Image (cartoon, rainbow, N blue to C red):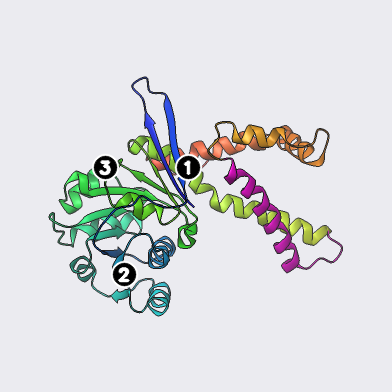
């Protein structure tokens, strides 16, 4: 299912949400795309695999950097007629029109400045969390309307993620169906709004940490339950919870309603009350505040 969501700031600075859920992406006649990835880490590989396996937007070719070699080799082996691996980043630009930059933050500027972009055909999408639109323009000399920032999670490999993008794309932009084919698109009005919207995406490791903590507790207290079985049980429990959350996520009071559904006096209500008494929910706010400061360059993200 494709999900298209646009977050728009009204003139009164209040945030309004408009969304649509369809079983098909926007219909758009377009020639097959030539896509390139500079850097081939986890996210780049996920997007590349998602694009290679979706059927909504025609893809002519996918050009990728050799590094990291294990991921680029796997992509080439899985999609030999579509994916080509290059050692020279300029070759990627020469063979692609839409370029995803997916390198480490401290490498971004130097990598881009070594490349020759063509204003007539290249569009740049940066997956580098700390990059800025102004900096990307300075490093590439591309027009502003051909430069975007994007944040997504590895689930786009299975067409189950959401791509957070800024600036807003024109309604006829190929980026809309392209990102819809990966699971969905959420468009931020500007970089400041995007900085806040990026924070929940940085809680992936925290969620896995919580799953591990629950799994380890179960192993230690489960009267001989194996680590494998405990991992399965915890994962399936949380998956069921997230399915309910996903089904209601277009509703304004989705999570309040789910909390209200917990049985009065039951174990789930007790657990939530205990979390509150421990100050765990307030701690989450502090973690998010620190991440927000890091994204905006105000701190290194550590808690004082």
Q: Which numbered mark, 2 or 3, is in the foreground of this view?
A: 3
Name the side, left or right, on which 242 lies relative to 261: left
Q: Residue 234 appears at what percent x and percent y?
A: 71, 57
**Is 127 in front, or is 180?**
180
The residue carrying mark 1 is 199
The residue shown at (62%, 33%) is: 282
Return the mark for residue 251. Answer: none
Vertical side of 291 occupied by 222: above or below: below
Tell me the distance, in whole angstroms, between the alpha carbons under discs 2 and 1. Answer: 28 Å
Tell me if I can see residue 119 in this picture.
Answer: yes
Instruction: Mark 3: give few (<14), some (14-19) or many (20+) Cα within 10 Å.
Output: few
Q: Residue 116 appears at what percent x and percent y?
A: 14, 61
The residue shown at (43%, 29%) is: 16
Tell me the distance, in whole angstroms, between the alpha carbons under discs 2 and 3. Answer: 27 Å
Quadrant of residue 20 in the image?
A: top left
The residue carrying mark 2 is 64
Tell me if I can see residue 298 in this picture.
Answer: no
Instruction: Decide which of tag 2 and tag 1 comes sooner along the chain.
Output: 2
Instruction: Decide which of tag 2 and tag 3 comes sooner along the chain.
Output: 2
Return the mark for residue 170. Answer: 3
Instruction: Mark 2: give few (<14), some (14-19) or many (20+) Cα within 10 Å.
Output: many
Badge 1 element? helix
Tell me the distance, in whole angstroms, between the alpha carbons under discs 3 and 1. Answer: 25 Å
**Is 248 in front, or is 70?**
248
């Amino acid at each position: 299912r494709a999900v298209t969501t646009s977050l728009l700031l009204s003139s009164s600075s209040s945030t309004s949400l408009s969304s649509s859920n369809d079983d098909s992406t926007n219909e758009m006649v377009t020639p097959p795309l030539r896509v390139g990835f500079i850097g081939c880490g986890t996210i780049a590989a996920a997007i590349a695999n998602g694009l290679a396996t979706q059927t909504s937007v025609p893809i002519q070719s996918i050009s990728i950097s050799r590094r990291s070699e294990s991921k680029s080799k796997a992509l080439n082996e899985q999609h030999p007629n579509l994916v080509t691996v290059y050692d020279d980043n300029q070759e990627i630009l020469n063979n692609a029109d839409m370029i995803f930059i997916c390198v480490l933050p401290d490498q971004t500027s130097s990598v881009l400045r070594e490349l020759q972009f063509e204003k007539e055909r290249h569009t740049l999408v940066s997956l580098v969390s700390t990059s800025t639109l102004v900096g990307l323009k300075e490093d590439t000399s591309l027009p502003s309307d051909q430069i975007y920032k994007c944040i997504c999670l590895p689930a786009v490999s299975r067409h189950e993620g959401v791509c957070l993008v800024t600036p807003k794309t024109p309604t006829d932009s190929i980026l809309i169906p392209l990102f819809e084919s990966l699971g969905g698109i959420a468009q931020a009005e500007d970089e400041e709004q995007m900085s806040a919207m990026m924070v929940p995406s940085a809680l992936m490791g925290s969620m896995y940490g919580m799953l591990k903590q629950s799994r380890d507790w179960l192993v230690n207290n489960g009267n001989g339950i194996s680590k494998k079985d405990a991992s399965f049980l915890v994962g399936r429990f949380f998956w069921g919870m997230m399915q309910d959350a996903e089904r209601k996520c277009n509703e304004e009071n989705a999570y309040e309603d789910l909390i209200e559904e917990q049985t009065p006096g039951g174990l789930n209500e007790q657990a939530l009350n205990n979390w509150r008494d421990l100050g765990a929910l307030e701690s989450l706010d502090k973690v998010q505040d620190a991440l927000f400061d890091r994204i905006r360059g105000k701190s290194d993200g550590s808690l004082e």
